[in-house]
Image (cartoon, rainbow, N blue to C red):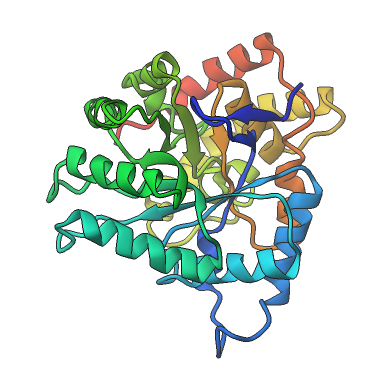
C-alpha cells in the first residue's frame, strides 16, 4: 500500500501515521537554549527513520515547549518533515491580529519561516468561525502557512469553516478529531461522511485511547485518574473480546501488535492517526502500523466487535 496520502485538496503529502507531540510539552529544560532532550531527539529520529513525516504540535502544549523541542529536533537532525501546529482561540483573543501574532511566536519557537498546516485548536465561540478563517486566509496569502485545518469542529462548524475558506479559494485541508476503535462517534455523527465528501482529511488524535488499545492496562493493572472511572475492571474484562479479535488479526499479519492493528484500522478508514510516543520503542511500534493493510473482512470484523463498546458521551 501507499503509506502516504495527500493532505486534503492540497499538494502536501503526509504519512498515514504521524506523531503527536503533546507529551513533549511536559518535558522541561532549565534553559531552552540547551541541546534538545536526548529522549525527544531519539523519538523524533526513530519516527522519521521508520517512514513518519508528519508531526503535530500546538502552542498550548507545555506553553510552547513542544514547539520549541520540535524546532531543536529539526535543527539537530534536519529532515523533510511536514509540520502542523495549532492556534487556541482563547475568549480574550478577539481580533484577526491575535492569530497572526500567535503564529509568529510559534514560528519563532519552531525556527521556521512557515508552517505546513496551521489549525484552529477548538471552536470557542467568542469570535465567529468566518472571522478566524479570514485571518487564516491572510497568513496563507503571506506565505506563513501552506494549509489550513481545524480541530474538534462539529458537522456544522466544519461546513462553516469550509465555506468561509472557499470564498478565498483556499481548501479546508483537515479536521483533527478524537477517533479510535473505542470511540467511533465520527462515523455516526456525519463528520466522516462530510469530510470524505468535501475532500477534508481526518486527523485522528487519541488513536490508541490513551494506552487502552495498546493493552498497557488490564483488569490487574487499572489506569489511574479519570480513566479509571471509564475503564474499570469490569470494562477491561469485557474488552478481552475485542482484543481476542485484534490478536488473531495481528498474528495473521506476521505478529503485528494491538497498537499496530488499531492504527492500521484508522488508515483503512482514510484517517491519519497521530499517536504519541514517550520513548523510541513506542515510536518504532507505532510506525509499524505502516507498510501493510487490513483486509475488508478484517475491518468488518473489528467494526462488528467494537460496536459493543461504542461510547455515548
State the residue in front, 134 or 128.
134
Quadrant for the C terminus in the image: top left
In the picture, measured across the screen, residue 146 lies left or right of residue 43, that is left
Tell which residue pokes out farthest to the bottom in this image: 30
Residue 46: image location, x then y, percent: 78, 56
Residue 191: image location, x then y, percent: 35, 23
Residue at the image point whose x is 50% and y is 56% from the top:
57
Residue at the image point whose x is 41% and y is 20% from the top:
187
Quadrant for the N terminus in the image: top right
Residue at the image point whose x is 44% and y is 52% from the top:
144
In the picture, measured across the screen, residue 25 lies left or right of residue 194, that is right
In the picture, measured across the screen, residue 235 lies left or right of residue 249, that is left
Residue at the image point whose x is 57% and y is 44% from the top:
274
Circle count: 0
Residue 14: image location, x then y, percent: 63, 37
Q: Is residue 166 above or below residue 85?
A: above
Choose top left, top right, bottom left or bottom right for residue 253: top right
State the residue in front, 244 or 246.
246
State the residue in front, 16 or 142.
142
Is residue 25 visible to us here? no
Q: Is residue 231 above or below residue 5?
A: below
Q: Is residue 61 above or below residue 193?
A: below
Tell which residue pokes out farthest to the right in this image: 254
Choose top left, top right, bottom left or bottom right for residue 259: top right
Is residue 13 visible to us here? yes
Residue 109: image location, x then y, percent: 50, 70
Tell which residue pokes out farthest to the top in this image: 297
Amino acid at each position: 500500500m501507499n503509506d502516504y496520502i495527500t493532505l486534503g485538496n492540497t499538494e502536501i503529502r503526509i504519512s498515514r501515521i504521524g506523531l503527536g507531540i503533546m507529551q513533549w510539552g511536559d518535558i522541561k529544560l532549565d534553559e531552552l537554549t540547551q541541546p534538545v532532550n536526548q529522549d525527544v531527539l531519539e523519538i523524533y529520529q526513530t519516527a522519521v527513520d521508520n517512514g513518519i513525516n508528519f508531526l503535530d504540535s500546538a502552542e498550548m502544549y507545555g506553553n510552547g515547549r513542544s514547539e520549541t523541542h520540535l524546532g531543536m529536533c529539526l535543527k539537530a537532525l534536519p529532515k523533510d518533515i511536514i509540520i502542523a501546529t495549532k492556534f487556541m482561540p482563547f475568549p480574550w483573543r478577539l481580533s484577526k491580529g491575535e492569530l497572526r501574532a500567535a503564529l509568529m511566536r510559534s514560528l519563532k519557537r519552531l525556527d521556521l519561516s512557515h508552517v505546513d498546516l496551521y489549525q484552529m485548536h477548538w471552536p470557542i465561540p467568542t469570535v465567529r468561525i468566518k472571522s478566524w478563517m479570514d485571518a487564516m486566509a491572510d497568513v496563507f496569502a503571506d506565505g506563513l502557512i501552506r494549509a489550513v485545518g481545524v480541530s474538534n469542529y462539529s458537522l456544522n462548524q466544519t461546513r462553516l469553516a469550509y465555506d468561509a475558506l472557499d470564498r478565498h479559494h483556499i481548501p479546508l485541508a483537515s479536521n483533527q478529531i478524537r477517533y479510535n476503535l473505542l470511540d467511533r462517534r465520527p462515523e455516526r455523527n456525519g463528520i466522516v461522511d462530510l469530510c470524505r465528501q468535501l475532500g477534508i482529511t481526518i486527523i485522528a488524535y487519541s488513536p490508541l485511547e490513551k494506552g487502552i488499545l495498546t493493552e498497557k492496562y488490564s483488569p490487574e493493572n487499572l489506569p489511574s485518574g479519570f480513566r479509571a472511572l471509564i475503564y474499570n475492571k469490569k470494562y477491561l474484562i469485557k474488552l478481552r473480546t475485542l482484543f481476542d479479535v485484534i490478536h488473531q488479526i495481528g498474528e495473521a499479519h506476521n505478529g503485528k501488535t494491538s497498537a499496530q492493528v488499531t492504527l492500521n484500522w484508522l488508515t483503512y478508514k482514510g484517517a491519519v492517526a497521530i499517536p504519541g510516543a514517550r520513548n523510541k520503542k513506542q515510536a518504532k511500534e507505532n510506525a509499524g502500523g505502516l507498510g501493510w493493510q487490513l483486509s475488508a473482512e478484517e475491518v468488518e470484523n473489528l467494526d462488528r466487535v467494537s460496536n459493543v463498546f461504542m461510547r455515548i458521551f
